[in-house]
Image (cartoon, rainbow, N blue to C red):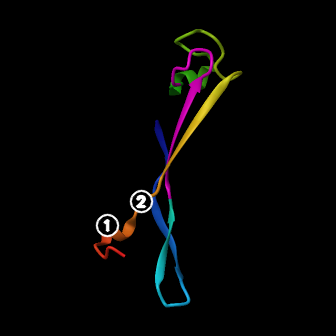
Amino acid sequence: MKKVQEAKKIGESTLEDGTTLAILQPEVYERIYCKNCENEVDSKEQATGTCSDCGKPWNEQFARDIQVNVVDFSMISGTGK
């Protein structure tokens, strides 16, 4: 899987009771793979459009897996809130 987006704090929101919450952008990973043979497509295959494992055009039938990881920045800062 290839990381396509870094996790980061993008803002804050304050609740009615005064509690401040961080607004986070999640860390995102993507895996593109050939549906013909289910092997992951590498950068060379992305350029050519042909799967080097099965020899078929992967871009006619492909799948994409997305993994989203939410990072708790409060644990990093040590506040624990």
Q: Quadrant of residue 7?
A: bottom left
Q: Position of residue 56 (x, y in %)?
A: 64, 11
The residue located at (66%, 15%) in the rendering is: 57
Query: Measured from the top left, where is residue 20 in percent x and y?
Result: 47, 82
Label 2 secondary element: loop
Q: Please say if the residues under marks 2 and 1 sit with CB atoms less than 8 Å apart.
A: yes
- In the image, what residue occupies the spot 36% across and 71% down? 74
| Structural distance between the alpha carbons of marks 2 and 1 | 9 Å
Determine the residue located farthest toward the front in the rendered image: 17
50 left or right, relative to 3: right
Q: Residue at x 71, y 21 (%)?
A: 60
- Start-end of magenta stretch: 26-40
Residue placed farthest to the bottom in the image? 17
Count residues near mark 2 (Cα–Cα under 10 Å), then give few for <14, some for 14-19, many for 20+: some
**Residue 34, relative to residue 78: is it above or below?**
above
Amino acid at circle 2: Val
Q: Specify whether residue 29 is painted magenta.
A: yes
Q: What residue sits right under mark 2 in the picture?
A: 71
